[in-house]
């Protein structure tokens, strides 16, 4: 972790520890420089990162302010804003249903930009939030990139392992969502009746070099699915 | 519009005109500098903007590549990625159901950070996509900021008017979504039966100075609601 990233984390921690609300003005640049013993450019990089992550907003000529939404119980839909981070009061667990190496069908091969004769790791999990079903998740990993998985790894955070264990750099993702009616099969896993609403999310995750490595399909239990997205609208 | 923004638009147009696909390598910096008659820093700013908007990705030491998803018919859920832009082949129209000035209830007042005795513009519209209902939209604008609206304005793009007509600078938004069952009342507007799935999205839009100016509640017709979100995962 670079210094500006560490300082960004410290500033975020400072906001949370002091329970600062949206619109609260942060100390001026000079104060932050002395508080964190860092150069002007390091502090500016840290603040730019926090702005990108939606934790502060900067008003030219006026200062830096806390950005923080006020609704409790909403899960951050975008993974760069931290799936677990916003779930302070939640317990997320995973139950692994299937884990194997298989050949992809043409939809999966196409999404991962590989051939149907190539290998993928297939992972099927149910994820729970406070003991209730949150979602049914099926993921397909290009085995040429994600070279090894086992049951212990996939029962925890796969992405932590991919980054820290395999040293891969995750770059960007394309997320497709739509709303539909739950099938009987999905209902079985989620403990819901056929025909109730569902949120269905498909994501293609790419490395920083543009290679897709993970295609995932997630069916959310509509009763647990309250999502939050932060957006910056100006250029 | 600043020069780098204009050049970003031109590069995007170039990608679309030539139907360049994801992973296609763009010309090197020097070529772009001479093609667009611009300095190195202007081109870099333009490319950074395009990366932020999800139109290109940059691989250190390797070059700049086109980023472009391959699924047709998905609407971009985040407005900074352009609601209409991705709907090239779609016709979006609005039918205004109600437009008036009223006092907000406490939920609206709280979301807009105003008092229940302050005035808001209330706009209720049905939006259509290719003649089918896309969504039912209710918006509450803080009248102290959005000082004037009329039926002609709200039957077009309200945000264009706010930016170009009123000269306001839109900064960031907080988006809350969940999935639920459609009510009979909503079904009436959307031409659907009570109890079918819906996507319900609430957004608080802020100016660049942090002031909330618009609180909107949108109920989407699940049959038309295929959404796309691009995300950058690295810092």
Image (cartoon, coloured by chain):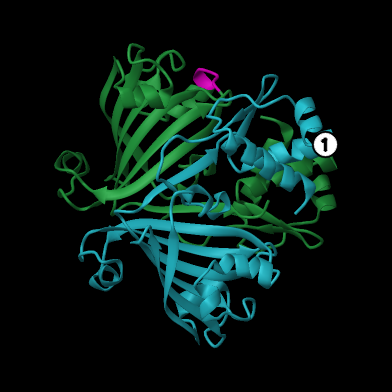
Chain colours: A cyan, B green
Extent of the magenta region:
B164-168
Residue A40 or residue B193, whichever sits in front: A40
Q: Which residue appears at 39% of the width and 29% of the height?
A: B215
Q: Is residue B167 magenta?
A: yes
State whether residue B38 appears in this view: no
Q: Which residue appears at 29% of the width and 32% of the height?
A: B125
Residue A19 falls left or right of residue A193: right
Please report, as a chain letter, where disc 1 is located. A
Q: Position of residue B208 (x, y in %)?
A: 58, 26
Residue A158, located in which quarter of the rendered image? bottom right
Q: On screen, B113 above or below A124? A: above
Q: On screen, B166 above or below A78? A: above
Look at the magenta stretch and give its main secondary structure.
Answer: loop
Instruction: Assess disc 1: are there few (<14), some (14-19) or many (≥20) residues with their C-alpha within 10 Å of its C-alpha.
Output: few
Q: Position of residue B117 (x, y in %)?
A: 33, 11
Query: Judging from the image, what secondary structure is the residue with disc 1 in?
Result: loop
Q: Position of residue A15 (x, y in %)?
A: 60, 35
Q: Position of residue B3 (x, y in %)?
A: 73, 33
Q: Quadrant of the C terminus of chain A?
A: top right
Q: On screen, A65 above or below B200? A: above
Q: Which residue is mark 1?
A: A37
């Amino acid at each position: 972790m670079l210094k500006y990233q560490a300082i960004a984390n410290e500033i975020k921690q400072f906001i949370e520890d002091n329970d600062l609300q949206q619109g609260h003005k942060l100390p001026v640049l000079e104060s932050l420089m002395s508080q964190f013993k860092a150069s002007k450019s390091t502090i500016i990089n840290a603040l730019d990162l926090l702005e990108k992550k939606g934790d502060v907003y900067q008003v030219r000529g006026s200062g830096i302010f806390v950005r923080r939404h006020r609704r409790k119980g909403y899960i951050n839909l975008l993974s760069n804003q931290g799936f677990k981070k916003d779930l302070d009061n939640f317990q997320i667990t995973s139950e692994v249903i299937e884990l194997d190496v298989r050949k992809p069908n043409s939809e999966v091969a196409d999404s991962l930009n590989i051939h149907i004769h190539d290998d993928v790791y297939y992972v099927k999990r149910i994820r729970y939030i406070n003991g209730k079903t949150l979602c049914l998740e099926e993921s397909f990993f290009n085995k040429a990139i994600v070279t090894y998985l086992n049951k212990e790894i996939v029962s925890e955070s796969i992405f932590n392992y991919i980054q820290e264990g395999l040293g891969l750099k995750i770059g960007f993702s394309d997320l497709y969502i739509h709303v539909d009616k739950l099938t009987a099969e999905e209902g079985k896993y989620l403990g819901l009746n056929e025909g109730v609403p569902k949120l269905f999310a498909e994501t293609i995750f790419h490395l920083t070099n543009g290679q897709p490595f993970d295609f995932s399909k997630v069916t959310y239990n509509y009763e647990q699915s309250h999502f939050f997205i932060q957006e910056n609208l100006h250029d």
